[in-house]
Image (tube, rainbow, N blue to C red):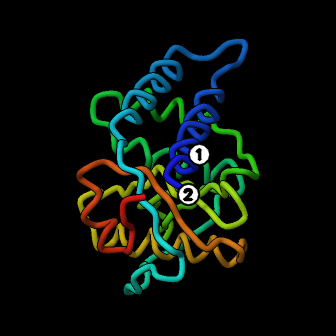
Amino acid sequence: MKSSIEQAFVKKNQWLASQVDVAFPTPESLRGRDSYLSRQQSYTSSLIAPASSLTTLPSFTGTIAKVDFHRLTIRFAVVLASLWEEDREDVLEFLTQLILEEEYTLYIGLDGVAPIACALIHNVTDELATVFDIALVDNENYELKKSFVHDAIKTHQAQYTSVTHIGTMALDTDKAWLNDLGFQAA
């Protein structure tokens, strides 16, 4: 499954990069794409978890919403771009160009009406889904991050009931909280 997770990660990055393959992309969106893709090279660890064995956690305290229209896409982009300090505005410009596709499901976590968390889930096969681009506005709040990811996966599984395994690509700094959630090396 490791190669399936890594291939899905590459495919997801190609899909996102293609969002600015248009006649007149803005210079900011092109710089944002390059910054986004550069950061993706840091994700080197393939992890997997049986969906049924994800650690049960206190529920996410906000609302989890499937991104299904452009206004929510903007909120997803705002949260994900918050991971960048230097190139935040360019990455935000890039991410706001997203055109939703059925193959990639975006989720946001809301505290009231404020977007505070995001993740992208992609069904690789009927049995394997991957979760990428996990971010929180307070990205160091690992307990909140774990509960959001757990509940986003469970929300996704309610629609795609055949998914038995969840994969991800992780930064070395994310391994501990992902291990707490039930992910192990693929």
**Residue at 53% across, 50% down:** 5
Where is 77 relative to 117, above or below?
above
Where does residue 120 sit, x and y in percent of width and height?
Answer: 55, 54
Answer with the quarter of the image where residue 59 lies. bottom left
> Of 159 and 29, which appears nearest the observer?
159
> Of 53 and 39, which appears nearest the observer?
53
The amino acid on which the numbered mark 1 sits, given as a three-letter code, is Ala
Where does residue 66 sit, x and y in percent of width and height?
Answer: 64, 64
Where does residue 24 sit, x and y in percent of width and height?
Answer: 68, 12
Where is 12 relative to 136, above or below?
above
**Residue at 65% across, 29% down:** 19
Where is 12 relative to 20, above or below?
below
- Location of the C terminus (image quadrant): bottom left
Local SS, label 2: strand
- Give the residue at mark 1: 8
- Location of the N terminus (image quadrant): bottom right
Q: Could you tell which of marks 2 and 1 lies nearer the N-terminus?
A: 1
**Residue at 64% across, 38% down:** 98
Which mark is drawn over residue 184?
none
Q: Total number of numbered labels?
A: 2
